Amino acid sequence: MKDAAATTSGQTIYLDDYTAPGWLVEEVHLTFRLAPEATRVLSKVRFVPNPDAPQGQFYLHGEQLSLIGASIDGTPVSPEVTEDGLTCDVPSGAFTWEAEVEIAPAKNFALEGLYMSNGMYCTQCEAEGFRKITYYPDRPDVMGVFTVRIEGEAPVKLSNGNPVREGEGWAEWHDPWPKPAYLFALVAGDLVNHPDSFTTRSGKDVALNIWVRPGDEGKCAFGMEALKKSMKWDEDVYGREYDLDIFNIVAVDDFNMGAMENKGLNIFNSSCVLASPETSTDANFERIEAIIAHEYFHNWTGNRITCRDWFQLCLKEGLTVYRDSQFTSDMRSAPVKRISDVIDLRARQFREDNGPLAHPVRPESFQEINNFYTATVYEKGAEVIGMLKRLVGDEAYAKALDLYFTRHDGQACTIEDWLAVFEESTGRDLSQFKRWYSQAGTPRLHVSESWADGTFTLHFRQETPATPGQPDKAPQVLPIAVGLIGPNGDEVQETTLLEMTESEQSFSFTGLGARPVPSILREFSAPVILHRESDNAERAFLLAHDTDPYCRWEAGRTLAKQALMRMITDNAEPDQAYLGALATLLSDETLDPAFRALAMALPSEDDLAQTLFETGHVPDPQRIWEKRQEMRDAMADAMPDLLAGLFAAHQVPGTYQPDAAPAAARALANSALALLSRRDGGERARAQFAKADNMTQELAALSCLLSIDAGEEELKTFYDQWHDDRLVMDKWFSLQVAYAPPAQVAATAERLATHSDFDMKNPNRFRATFGALTMTPAGFHHASGAGYRLLADWLIKLDPLNPQTTARMCTAFQTWTRYDADRQGMIRAELERMAAQPKLSRDTSEMVSRILA
Ligand code: PHE
Ligand code: ZN
């Protein structure tokens, strides 16, 4: 009985064990009688035997449900109920199952299933939350047509699909599109809407709404515009139209993740949809636009075509992340988006790939699927699609996608289905490419060069380090985009794609007049770590001349990284050559200010720690922090006039607009301000704080002050101004932790957790405080061990309430084997203390044991 095993604590589920469901669902009727402590859920489900699979024992998932009664075809039955579900004898043909259960949404702090947030009822069913609502075959390959009746006092009652009827105290919804249970949603509460509409390209009018708590109406306009842009973009670029009469978005304050693509009723963490100039930063605006797009795009990649099982999660997530990144590139600056994505990929996915939690884009086993909503599945999953598109070309990609949509509409699919449409529409054999889905780990790509008689040759060698459960790796297909630059700075070979398939492979360019400088891995054409011996002069040359913005940025980053590494390992002084090259780049008025702001950011402390570790050093987080500070001081000293000039020249006059151009100017001005503040005593930042009329300027100024140990006054002002705004208060919490001196980081988080505005049940607030702790390496890894202890204390407290958020935050410990014996010992002790908790959740216990393994 596979399904039962799937939810038993400590059991491992394997992709290879997949079996088709014995019973399919035709129709589902649900009635909710809402009450905070005792909601009744009545279900009526039409089951039919699956003609393509043996029926086996009839089994329904169900957790934390009180079964009031059940019947089959109207005759009461007494199913055998366990902690995870129930079995029952059923007729051999089609039948109607009815059940009534009771649940307590007001006591649900796991935020999975039906729960309450600020008096509002809402649901979260992905991945396996529907089983906490009623007994049901809670697996994505069982798709049914849902009709939902909601009874209760709440003035607004929403579910999937289209509204059918409503009366005093009830409302009915019908979703004509068959869907798996994880896409079910219900919301009920005292909500107000921001309405709009969209006409699809075939002329259908769609009502759009963003539903929020009274008081938040003024923060919906931006999200609504983003939604309309997304709808238009998906029509223009992928030919996909919306397919219901209404599309609802709801903002909830308590939510474990960013947002959820429930059919016709997307539910958002309020931080990912509510926006206003006064309360949101430029970065918030950009992220909100991207997440709205992401969830909307799921309507086709996820909902119309869903996953056969949870091992196929990247089928919908990788593709949808890829689509939302294309959207952002089209709406804003494509090079800046690409560089930002690379930074994010290295910070989160490479980090994961290099440690004990490494897993393939399509995992082959899990204990708790919630633990696999990872950077690998999402971001590496998107990179894999980007490589596929690059290999087959834009036209073939479009053709393959059309085939995917027509062939698989309405189905629950696999990665094999996905690759088959590419193989069939291009004639390509993708069996080696498929390793990107099955092999974990980041390939290392080593390159050397040779030059003779006008021929320039690049010699590549790839190797992927062992990862848990995968000691040996086979070579993968690497699309390597390369250009060549002549000695005078002109491009002598425009971007060409090399397709590497072997462990070692060479590629030659002939007929060259002089030895060129290669620009390798343009646009970051494959998610690999490139190892190339080259000197600083050559990097500075690329920084000055490369036509590919990513490679140009990367040249600068490598210079900075080398300089920092020498400061850390050899006590070197800040590299004047780097500072000079940076100054030249920053003065180049032809360059996008956003690009220049990115070029100004130093490699992160975590990135340096990982690189030190890989080059045979034991990283000292305190020293890394100090040397980065020293470099920032050197930057401030090396170019004071340039920085002051950039700051002055990029002030944006007039009313705040969140668009890319003014945001880019603010980014550059604020990067300059951060350095200037190190030398002006915070004078400029204080002035900016005082006159700021938008959160970007206000928060940047406050951060500058806190980072030079000033800003106490401003912090109070900020609190007084914003203490009624939850989302801004999250910033107030995290800022103080992130900018505390390393020795004070843990104490600051600890103190904030006793603040009357701290609420551990709210994931945003918990993350604002303790997420900031984990993302401040010198503080988190302080030699006292206080950071480790504090995090473990709070994860132990949170686990019984919210396992999902607890497990996710355990990833803070995934890099532990990089550090010295003392730190390793302290971390191990904390992980073991967590593992020893008597009722540790399946989520957290899986994470802790994988990290310790
Ligand atoms: N499917 C959601 C998304 O990527 C993420 C999510 C997963 C949300 C699980 C909630 C729970 O858009
Ligand atoms: Zn998604």
Image (cartoon, grey):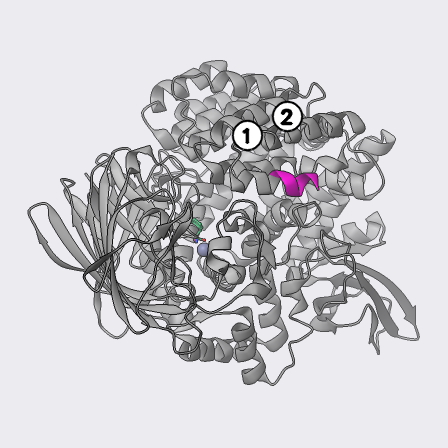
Location of residue 434 in the rendering, given as x and y in whole percent from the top left corner = 64, 70
- What residue span does the magenta drawing correspond to? 848-853
Q: Residue at x 68, y 33 (%)?
A: 639
* Callout 2: CB less than 8 Å from ligand 1: no
Q: Amino acid at mark 2?
A: Tyr
Q: CA distance from mark 1 to mark 2?
A: 20 Å
Q: Secondary structure at mark 1?
A: loop
Vertical relation: 488 (above or below) 131: below
Q: Nearer the viewer, residue 403 or 539?
A: 403
Location of residue 846 in the rendering, given as x and y in whole percent from the top left corner = 59, 43
Q: Which label was assigned to residue 838?
A: 1
Say few, some or many: other residues with alpha carbon within 10 Å of mark 1 (under 14 / 14 to 19 / 20 or more). Answer: few
Location of residue 662 in the rendering, given as x and y in whole percent from the top left corner = 45, 45
Location of residue 536 in the rendering, given as x and y in whole percent from the top left corner = 83, 48
Q: Amino acid at mark 1?
A: Pro
Residue at the top extreme, as displayed: 713
Question: Dot 2 corresponds to which residue?
Answer: 788
Q: Nearer the viewer, residue 257 or 451?
A: 257
